[in-house]
Image: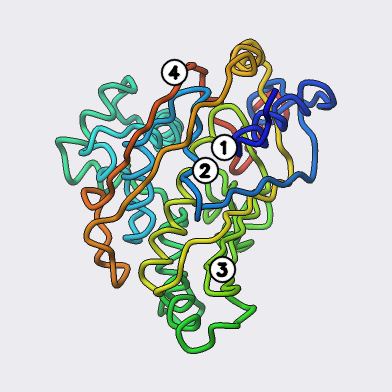
């Protein structure tokens, strides 16, 4: 078997977890998963775009979610209005808990999402995910009341000092995470892909992501595409050629209810990666729009479905545990 195709790095990681993964249980959901710790894959974007082909990846979701991040948004209404529903579960989970305590209407998930779409006031109150990636990338809160645009700073710093070694964007803010935070401030959703660093070497721009927790079957194919597209955008803005996307993992895992889908995926031979073009090429962050991105020659195996486990965020004890 010719394993020079870049996708085999991902497939080999799936096999690694099947062979060596240690069983654990998610404290908040009791979901069973199997994981390894400390792995890395690398994709050369100067050759092709790593949109995985052994199952179809939701490209529309990649585009709109990345725009949501880059534009500094934190309310899911933009995604819902564009028929992208990858972030629906967390605000709905928060609404259900609030409804149980405050006698709010007991809405189904479909009814909740419809109200997000049609009722601006409802969306403003119940659709916001405070301290999510876009807000922290573009509007990091400070103790003196102003915000810091980390990503704009990285771009300017790279222009001022092409050899800079400090070009980091982080979403990991202990003030709002887990039991480090005050209960009233703590995020009810996880920050998984928590830090990335940009580096220019030899005229090529590279991006390394550190992902502390990685759902290999559902989330990681999406993350690979999203951060690779981010690298292309930043390369265009700064005038460099795209280099490598380096994906560094902390806990890399497969949920037990995804095992059979993973085994099916591993039977599939990767197809050639597609190309991605940005037209017109963005010269600044505000120039990027989803409709400026063109995916060419994407040929994949069929979709493999898997149920999302709404895990992570603040662990709250139930009454029996207290």
Pointer 4: what residue? 303
Q: Secondary structure at mark 4?
A: loop
Question: Residue at coordinates 64% horizontally, 61% vertically from top-left?
Answer: 174
Q: Secondary structure at mark 3?
A: strand
**Which of disc 1 and disc 4 is earlier in sequence?**
1
User: In what quadrant of the picture does the C terminus appear?
Assistant: top right
Looking at the picture, tell me which residue is in the foreground, 119 or 39: 39
Question: Residue at coordinates 59% horizontally, 55% vertically from top-left?
Answer: 194
Pointer 2: what residue? 223
* Residue density around tag 2, few if under 14, some if 14–19, many if 20 or more, within 10 Å: many
The tally of labels here is 4
Q: Which residue in the rendered view is the most extreme toward the left?
A: 118
Q: Secondary structure at mark 2?
A: helix
Question: Residue at coordinates 47% horizontally, 46% vertically from top-left?
Answer: 48
Pointer 1: what residue? 220
* Residue density around tag 1, few if under 14, some if 14–19, many if 20 or more, within 10 Å: some
Tag 2 and tag 1, C-beta contact below 8 Å: yes
**Which of disc 2 and disc 3 is earlier in sequence?**
3
Q: Against 224, is 18 above or below?
A: above
CA distance for labels 4 and 3: 32 Å
Query: Percent x, y for residue 97?
Result: 46, 32
CA distance for labels 4 and 1: 15 Å
Q: Quadrant of residue 3?
A: top right
Query: Percent x, y for residue 314?
Result: 61, 43
**Which of disc 2 and disc 4 is earlier in sequence?**
2
Looking at the picture, tell me which residue is in the foreground, 256 or 229: 229
Q: Against 70, is 76 above or below?
A: above
* Residue density around tag 4, few if under 14, some if 14–19, many if 20 or more, within 10 Å: few
**Which of disc 1 and disc 3 is earlier in sequence?**
3
Pointer 3: what residue? 198
Q: Secondary structure at mark 1?
A: helix
């Amino acid at each position: 078997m010719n394993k020079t195709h870049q996708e085999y790095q991902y497939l080999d990681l799936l096999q690694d977890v099947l062979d060596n993964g240690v069983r654990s249980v998610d404290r908040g959901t009791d979901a069973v998963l199997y994981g390894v710790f400390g792995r890395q894959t690398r994709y050369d974007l100067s050759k092709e775009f790593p949109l995985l082909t052994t199952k179809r990846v939701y490209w529309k979701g990649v585009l709109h979610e990345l725009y949501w991040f880059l534009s500094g948004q934190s309310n899911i209404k933009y995604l819902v209005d564009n028929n992208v529903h990858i972030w629906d579960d967390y605000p709905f989970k928060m609404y259900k808990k609030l409804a149980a305590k405050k006698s709010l209407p007991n809405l189904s998930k479909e009814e909740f999402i419809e109200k997000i779409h049609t009722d601006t006031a409802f969306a403003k109150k119940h659709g916001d995910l405070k301290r999510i990636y876009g807000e922290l990338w573009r509007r990091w809160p400070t103790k003196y009341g102003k915000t810091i645009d980390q990503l704009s700073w990285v771009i300017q710093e790279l222009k001022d000092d092409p050899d800079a070694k400090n070009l980091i964007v982080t979403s990991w803010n202990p003030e709002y995470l887990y039991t480090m935070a005050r209960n009233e401030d703590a995020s009810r959703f996880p920050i998984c892909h928590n830090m990335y660093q940009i580096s220019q070497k030899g005229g090529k721009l590279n991006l390394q992501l550190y992902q502390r927790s990685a759902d290999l079957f559902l989330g990681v194919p999406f993350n690979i595409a999203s951060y690779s597209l981010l690298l292309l955008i930043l390369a265009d803005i700064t005038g460099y050629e795209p280099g490598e996307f380096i994906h560094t993992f902390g806990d890399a895992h497969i949920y037990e209810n995804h095992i059979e889908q993973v085994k099916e995926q591993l039977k599939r031979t990767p197809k050639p990666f597609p190309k991605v073009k940005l037209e017109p090429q963005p010269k600044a962050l505000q120039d990027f729009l989803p409709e400026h991105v063109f995916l060419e020659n994407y040929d994949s195996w069929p979709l493999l479905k898997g149920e999302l486990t709404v895990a992570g965020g603040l662990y709250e004890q139930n009454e029996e545990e207290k």
